[in-house]
Image: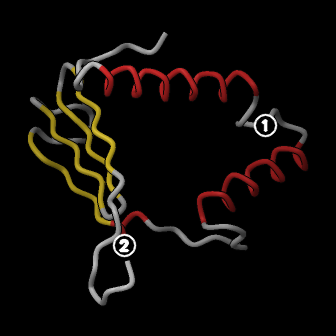
Amino acid sequence: WSRRHHRLVETRLRVIGLQGELIATDDEVRLFLEGPVGEFAQGWTVWRHPELFHGVAFDVGGPQYSRQDQAFVDAVRAGHPVESDVVSAYRVQQVVDAIYRSASLGGEPVRPS
């Protein structure tokens, strides 16, 4: 990690579905579709980091955390329900648990409970 040009460990998420797959890394998001779906053509669609990045009004701990904080503040100010409530957190945890189960089964697909 301290050598010049040494790549840090890459985080990669791969989701395989009935109509294709989605691969997300620190640098890009790749979508492969067996056939066209909505606005997306058959084959590979790739979005790279510079195309996906949208600045934030303030940065506390990274743009991802800042966006979550801003969404919370905006919801409270407008009197709307917050997006990150207990139910959505539980659903996210179900997906994370399914990812771990899939990994322990050698990558076998696992449906979140």
Residues 41 and 10: in front is 10
Relative to residue 35, is residue 22 depicted above or below? below
Q: What residue would you read off at disc 2?
A: 50
Q: Which residue is drawn at 32% across and 59% down?
A: 10
Mark 2 / mark 1, whichever is N-terminal? 2
Residue most extreme to the top:
113
Q: Where is residue 4 in the image (x, y as percent from the top left)?
A: 30, 90
Q: What residue would you read off at disc 1?
A: 82
Q: Position of residue 88 (x, y in %)?
A: 65, 27
Relative to residue 43, is residue 26 depicted above or below? below
Q: Position of residue 71 (x, y in %)?
A: 73, 50
Identify the image quadrant of residue 47: bottom left
Q: Left or right of 70: which side holds 34?
A: left
Label drawn at residue 105:
none
Residue most extreme to the front:
2
Task: Indicate the quadrant containing the N terminus: top left, top right, bottom left or bottom right.
Answer: bottom left
Q: Which residue is drawn at 19% across and 50% down?
A: 45
Count the labels in the image: 2
Secondary structure under badge 1? loop
Q: Left or right of 38: which side holds 69?
A: right
Residues 111 and 51: in front is 111
Task: Identify which amino acid the numbered label 2 is placed on.
Answer: Pro
Q: For mark 2, does the 10 Å Cα neighbourhood hold few (<14), some (14 to 19), or many (20 or more) residues?
A: few
The CA span between labels 2 and 1 is 28 Å
Task: Identify which amino acid the numbered label 1 is placed on.
Answer: Val
Relative to residue 51, is residue 41 depicted above or below? above
Q: Left or right of 105: which side holds 33?
A: left
Identify the image quadrant of residue 20: top left
Secondary structure under badge 2? helix
